[in-house]
Image (tube, rainbow, N blue to C red):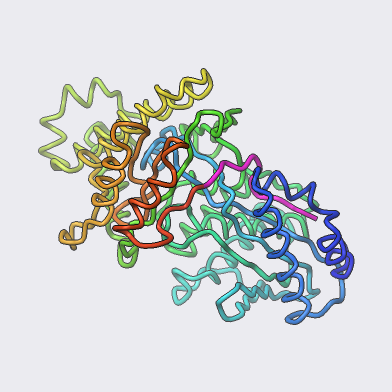
């Protein structure tokens, strides 16, 4: 923690460049851009909250799901990566019991931390996340107090890069650094964010998004025991594969899809209940197939199909991690494509059933497959139903791929990203 004046001087002189490079990747222009964003945040903080006291600079990344589509909430396995598209913050303690958060493009948020009970009127808002994270810190025995924060985000909302998880990790990292001497682990910060999203924000999400954002790099996560997930970092340089990771914005609207998302764990749970279990991870796959007629009768066809997806994608997420460990990117791509097919035909999360005429995600996938012409891989990304598609594009095809996608989906729909090695971070 330093004075605002010193941090601004260090940003201007480039003294923090060495700390910023791991968050930016090989692109020197991105380093300049991130430094500029932080300098602007520091100045915004000065204007909004004054220059007194010590402050810190923080970053939390968006995340990309690389394997295991909707397997986490069934205590399954996933493969995920933190990306260079991030949130940045300038924050400091304010000596009160009020959290004041100024996010670029939004009115200032004020949350009284003396009242940490869920408020129905705050469901679906950032205030609910701040209140819920603070409540969980306190319930776990950690101190929290009032703080000021200015936040700037380049994690696209509704993109499948999980801006909500990046926000939760950001608030957690700020509280941890300001008041807890960084004693809370990154895994705990992820779990705290999930708790806030489930119990205060009102969204029944799993833990993958928060863990990927908090831990960073490429991570293979086993949620067999959600309270103690097994997290293994995979040392793999995606650029060495000769492929680029592209997240494609389909242009579909994410609004009013909570019921679609909620139906996925509910129907998978209904299939598990046919065997006296709460989660599909606890069901033997052989028993499922031997009793498929019973599952259809009790839970319905769609629940049975979604259970089939869980069993296949849960195994393939592990195989993807093993393929990267062996530097077998051809095998990895084949598994990505297989996951995409399973999501489309079994999980059925490519479009909203209430709006069947709107099929932007299937359209984006079909167009990407056409442009890749048998190379690379493409699949639905994240929660599905709307939002984004993930593609692995041969380096030599990147510009032609971008041009072809933008001709149909609009300028700026393609985001070529890199996997950043660090998750939730204290920059200075």
Which residues, given as a range, are shown in magenta? 417-428
Give the quadrant of the N terminus: bottom right
The image quarter containing residue 240 is top right
Q: Residue at x 59, y 67 (%)?
A: 131
Query: Considering depth in this image, is 272 or 375 the residue closer to the camera?
Result: 375
Q: Position of residue 254 (x, y in %)?
A: 34, 63
Q: Residue at x 43, y 49 (%)?
A: 247
Query: Considering depth in this image, is 207 or 62 the residue closer to the camera?
Result: 62
Q: Is residue 243 above or below residue 126?
A: above
Q: Would you say 183 lies left or right of 72 here?
A: right
Give the quadrant of the C terminus: bottom right
Please tell me whether residue 84 belongs to the stretch shown in magenta: no
Q: Main secondary structure of the magenta part?
A: loop
Query: Considering depth in this image, is 424 or 143 the residue closer to the camera?
Result: 424
Query: Considering depth in this image, is 408 or 16 the residue closer to the camera?
Result: 408
Q: Residue at x 36, y 48 (%)?
A: 389
Q: Is residue 327 above or below residue 221?
A: above
């Amino acid at each position: 923690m330093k004075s605002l004046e010193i941090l601004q001087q260090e940003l201007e002189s480039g003294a923090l460049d060495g700390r910023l490079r791991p968050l930016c990747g090989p692109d020197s222009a991105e380093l300049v851009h991130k430094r500029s964003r932080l300098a602007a945040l520091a100045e915004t903080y000065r204007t909004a909250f004054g220059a007194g006291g010590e402050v810190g600079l923080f970053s939390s990344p968006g995340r990309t799901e690389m394997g295991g589509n909707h397997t986490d909430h069934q205590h399954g396995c996933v493969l995920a990566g933190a990306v260079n598209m991030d949130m940045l913050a300038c924050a400091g303690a304010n000596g009160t019991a009020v959290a004041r958060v100024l996010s670029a493009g939004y009115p200032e948020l004020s949350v009284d931390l003396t009242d940490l009970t869920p408020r129905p009127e705050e469901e679906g808002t950032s205030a609910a996340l701040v209140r819920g994270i603070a409540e969980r810190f306190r319930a776990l025995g950690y101190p929290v107090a009032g703080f000021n924060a200015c936040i700037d985000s380049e994690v696209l909302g509704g993109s499948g890069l999980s801006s909500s998880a990046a926000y939760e990790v950001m608030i957690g990292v700020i509280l941890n650094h300001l008041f807890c001497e960084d004693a809370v682990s990154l895994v705990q910060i992820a779990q705290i964010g999930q708790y806030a999203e489930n119990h205060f924000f009102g969204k029944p999400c799993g833990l993958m998004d928060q863990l990927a954002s908090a831990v960073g790099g490429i991570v293979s996560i086993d949620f067999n025991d959600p309270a103690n997930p097994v997290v293994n970092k995979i040392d793999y340089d995606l650029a060495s594969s000769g492929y680029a990771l592209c997240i494609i914005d389909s242009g579909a609207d994410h609004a009013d899809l909570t019921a679609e998302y909620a139906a996925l764990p509910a129907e998978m749970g209904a299939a598990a209940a046919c065997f006296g279990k709460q989660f599909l991870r606890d069901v033997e796959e052989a028993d499922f197939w031997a009793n498929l007629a019973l599952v259809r009768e009790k839970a319905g066809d769609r629940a049975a199909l979604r259970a089939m997806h869980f069993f296949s994608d849960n195994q393939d997420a592990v195989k993807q991690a093993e393929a990267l460990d062996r530097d077998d990117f051809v095998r990895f791509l084949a598994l990505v494509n297989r996951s995409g097919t399973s999501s489309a035909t079994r999980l059925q999360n490519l479009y909203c059933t209430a709006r069947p005429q709107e099929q932007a995600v299937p359209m984006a996938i079909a167009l990407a497959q056409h442009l890749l012409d048998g190379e690379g891989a493409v699949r639905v990304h994240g929660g599905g139903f709307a939002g984004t598609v993930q593609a692995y594009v041969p380096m030599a095809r990147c510009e032609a791929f971008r041009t072809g996608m933008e001709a149909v989906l609009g300028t700026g729909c393609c985001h070529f990203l890199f996997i950043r090695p660090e998750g939730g971070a204290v920059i200075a």
